[in-house]
């Protein structure tokens, strides 16, 4: 699907920590390589990736799409496609450390060129300008079913220590295996909010036929930031969760990404 950059997609059941992991990976990529050209895409309309990254009220692709639709009347599908560059230019947030794009709400007005279609096109058209594109995907399997998130270089499936988290991870794996166009080049499981019972958790992963690529502990540093409404991106570099994510990147990604 994409040339020119390494595309990482974070997916998993709702509430397992996808956005938190996205913010921690963003920080680790930036800290480990200040020169990296990184684009973070918030592909979940209710995700909160912007606030996790310390970005205030970004304009989303969905909002600009609706503005265009309200203004153009008929022939909307064509107009949206013609305006893709405008949409991306007016929504892309450029910072020194990374760039950010919020997809926003999907399909509220009209059914032409829905946000998910724009997302697909955005990844293709923007990716050559970046070394890494990191996508915080919508919870569950909808975007996979719609073939929005397909053929990425690395699919990181996040679960918490719950039966349903592992089951959803297993379903995600099966879906990507059933559809060749969805198949990522690599795929691994991250167990988030780990407290204890590692053997049991590894057995769950084994049952779902998933390789465990990393374990992130339950971390007070995250809960404290969350309670204060502070961005996870600002987490201390000494925090256990940050250390774990850095190790995951070093082991799994570094040779390919950095
Ligand atoms: N390792 C952790 N330690 C402590 N708290 C955590 C950890 N990971 C996530 N959390 C907390 O769990 C909650 C859910 O996390 P998050 O929003 O990242 O999940 P999500 O998978 O993105 O959810 P959604 O599906 O709603 O987008 C948040 O309150 C977050 O602070
Ligand atoms: Mg989220």
Image (tube, grey):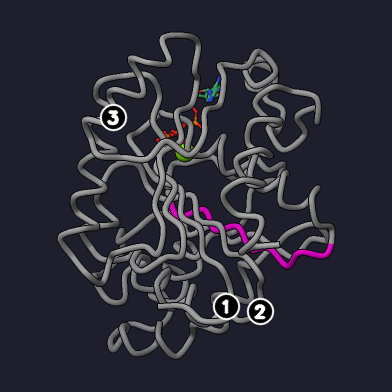
Q: Quadrant of residue 231?
A: top right
Mark 3: secondary structure? helix
Asked whether mark 1 lies closer than 8 Å to ligand 2, one says: no
Name the side, left or right, on which 94 lies relative to 193.
Answer: right
Q: Residues within 10 Å of mark 3 (few under 14, many from 20)?
A: many
Image position of 207 with respect to 42: above or below: above
Image position of 128 with respect to 11: above or below: below
Image position of 11 with respect to 63: above or below: above
Q: Residue furthest top?
A: 196
Which mark lies nearer to you, 2 or 3? 3
At 41% from the left and 9% from the top, the residue drawn is 197
At 63% from the left and 77% from the top, the residue drawn is 89
Name the side, left or right, on which 187 lies relative to 91.
Answer: left
Cα separation, mark 1 vs mark 2, equals: 6 Å
Please give the range of residues in magenta: 35-43
Label 3, on which residue? 166
Cα separation, mark 1 vs mark 3, equals: 33 Å
Q: Residues within 10 Å of mark 1 (few under 14, many from 20)?
A: some
| Circles 1, 2 touching at the beta carbon (< 8 Å) | yes
Mark 2: secondary structure? helix
| Residue 235 point in image, percent of width and height | 75, 29
Asked whether mark 2 lies closer than 8 Å to ligand 2, one says: no
| Circles 1, 3 touching at the beta carbon (< 8 Å) | no
User: In which quadrant of the rendered image does the N terminus lie?
Assistant: bottom left
Label 2, on which residue? 129
Mark 1: secondary structure? helix
Cα separation, mark 2 vs mark 3, equals: 35 Å
Which mark lies nearer to you, 1 or 3? 3
Between residues 147 and 184, which one lies in front from this camera angle? 184
Q: Going from the N terminus, do you reach mark 1 or mark 3 first?
A: 1
| Residue 26 point in image, percent of width and height | 67, 48
């Amino acid at each position: 699907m994409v040339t020119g950059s390494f595309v990482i997609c974070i997916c998993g059941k709702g509430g397992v920590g996808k956005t938190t992991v996205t913010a921690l990976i963003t920080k680790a990529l930036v800290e480990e390589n200040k020169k990296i050209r990184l684009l973070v895409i918030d592909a979940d309309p209710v995700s909160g990736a912007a606030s996790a990254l310390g970005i205030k009220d970004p304009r989303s692709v969905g909002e600009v799409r609706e503005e265009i639709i309200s203004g153009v009347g008929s022939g909307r599908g064509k107009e949206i496609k013609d305006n893709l560059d405008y949409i991306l230019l007016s929504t892309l947030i450029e910072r020194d450390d990374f760039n950010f794009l919020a997809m926003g709400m999907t399909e509220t007005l009209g059914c032409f060129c829905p946000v998910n279609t724009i997302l697909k096109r955005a990844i293709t058209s923007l990716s050559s300008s970046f070394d890494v594109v990191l996508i915080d995907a919508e919870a569950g399997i909808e975007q996979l079913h719609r073939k929005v998130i397909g053929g990425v270089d690395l699919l990181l499936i996040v679960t918490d220590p719950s039966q349903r988290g592992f089951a959803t991870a297993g379903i995600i794996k099966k879906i990507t295996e059933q559809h060749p166009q969805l198949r990522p080049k690599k795929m691994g499981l991250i167990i988030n909010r780990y407290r204890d019972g590692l053997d049991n958790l590894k057995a769950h992963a084994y049952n779902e036929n998933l390789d465990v690529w990393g374990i992130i502990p339950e971390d007070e540093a995250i809960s404290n930031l969350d309670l204060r409404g502070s961005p996870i991106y600002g987490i201390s570099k000494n925090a256990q969760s940050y250390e774990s994510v850095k190790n995951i990147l070093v082991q799994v990604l570094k040779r390919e990404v950095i």
